[in-house]
Image: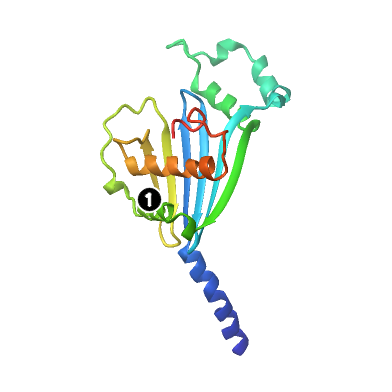
Amino acid sequence: MKSKFLFFALLFPVIVLAQQETKIRIKGVNPESLNVFYLSIVQGRNVVKVFYKIQDSLSSKVKYDPDYIALKQEPSSSFIETSTGTVSQKYTERLGSIFNRYYVYTIDSLQFFKSKNRGYFNLISKVKDLSKEKLPEDKRSFLDGTSIKLDISDGKLERTIQVRSPDGNNNPLIAQFITETFNLFRKGKNDKYLTPQRTSGY
């Protein structure tokens, strides 16, 4: 009985720590510029860990992929929608599936204590409290711009929020959060790679 009590006593701090973590994952996709970026933010009680991954280029190894070679050998007429004369969705999906195996990404990470950047800690808390009901209605066209998907978890609840091209006028909190997250690297690590062109303007 004593050993069981000791086990749960040791386990309890781990459970509490997990519940105190806030995790935010962000994916941004701009089909026009072909920009794709990922952000991951993990907030503990006193420490934040931040990661980014940006789609950089397509490896030349793709041309040796058997699926890619087979696709190239198929007659082009099989990829065209006869009614519209445009490339079929099926072809686009097959090609995209192959390319996904060969994309090259630039990746970096950092971590810092709450005492070093309380403003960012507060920003995480505001984003964590976001819900779909609190988001203003966006009446802009969804045919262009950057699609942003946020997955938010605080150990108790998990939710997903999707918005289009957040900026100073539309969903400014999300726009500020993405920009400030990239700025952690720009300012803290003097990261010259993270140009606005690569981060869809954020």
Where residue 189 sits in the image (x, y, percent)? 57, 43
Looking at the rendering, in which quadrant would you find the C terminus? Answer: top left
Return the residue found at the far bottom: 2
Position of 52 with respect to 129 (left or right) is: right
Quadrant location of the N terminus? bottom right
Near mark 1 (Cα within 10 A), the count class, few <14, some 14-19 or many ≥20, is: some
**Identity, as a three-letter code, of the amino acid under mark 1:** Val
Q: Secondary structure at mark 1?
A: helix
Corner quadrant of residue 66: top right
Which residue is more in the foreground, 113 or 105? Answer: 113
Q: Is residue 98 above or below residue 5?
A: above
Residue 17 horizontal/vertical position (percent): 51, 67
| Front residue of this view, candidates 6 and 129 | 129
Look at 64% across and 20% down and name the residue there.
71
Left of 46 or right of it: where is 144?
left
x%, y% of residue 72? 65, 16
Give the labeled residue for mark 1.
127
The answer to whether 13 is drawn above or below residue 198 in the figure is: below
Tell me how the rendering is colored. rainbow
**Residue 59 location, x and y as percent?**
68, 27
Residue in view at x 48 percent, y 40 percent: 27
How many discs appear?
Answer: 1
Residue located 39% across and 28% down the image: 145
Name of the residue lying farthest toward the right? 64
